[in-house]
Image (cartoon, helix red, strand yellow):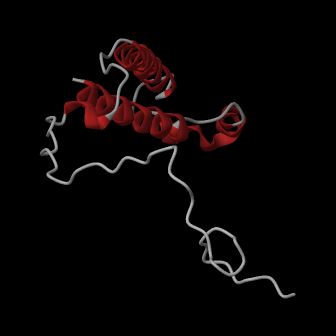
Amino acid sequence: MQSIALVIHVALSIAVIGLVLIQHGKGADAGAAFGSGASSTVFGARGAASFLTRLTTVLAVCFFATSIALFYMAANRDTGSGSVTDGLPVIEAPASDVPSVTVEEDAPAATDSESGAADTDLPKPAE
């Protein structure tokens, strides 16, 4: 429903832009007074101004109605807050056969016989 309203909204916006660009400006009436007014007699004595103005008004009202409808749809959609992974099935890991290693606290640390230091990967200090 929202995508249909969005397509109608875009079509209405293009139509309103086109109608506004087609209409004559306020300065066009001055040119008609000096003899070039015969070009707008297709729509009657007043020309196309009243027809295009009414059509623009109707399309603008429809544009605002679709704007409000799209706002209402966006504000009331039920998406919920969560992660994409919330919908995935839960897979439990198999139990491991490897025994766990426990460290006794009372066991003495292994020492190097020469320096009396604990086993380490660091080089011996120079004396």
Where residue 76 sits, quadrant-wise, is top left
Residue 93 screen position, x and y as percent: 16, 44
Identity of the residue furthest to the right in this view: 127
Residue 110 screen position, x and y as percent: 55, 66
The mark tally for this picture is 0
Q: Quadrant of the C terminus?
A: bottom right
Residue 102 screen position, x and y as percent: 37, 46
Seen from the viewer's position, the closer of residues 92 and 124 is 124
Where residue 27 sits, quadrant-wise, is top right
Name the residue located 34 percent from the left edge and 16 percent from the top edge. 73
Name the residue located 68 percent from the left edge and 81 percent from the top edge. 114
Identity of the residue furthest to the front in this view: 113
Is 18 on the left-hand or right-hand side of 123? left
Name the residue located 51 percent from the left edge and 43 percent from the top edge. 105
Residue 30 screen position, x and y as percent: 72, 34
Name the residue located 72 percent from the left edge and 77 percent from the top edge. 115
Seen from the viewer's position, the closer of residues 81 and 54 is 81
On screen, residue 18 above or below 57:
below
Is 107 on the left-hand or right-hand side of 85? right
Where residue 120 sits, quadrant-wise, is bottom right
Seen from the viewer's position, the closer of residues 102 and 28 is 102
Q: Quadrant of the N terminus?
A: top left
Seen from the viewer's position, the closer of residues 105 and 77 is 105
Is 39 on the left-hand or right-hand side of 34? left
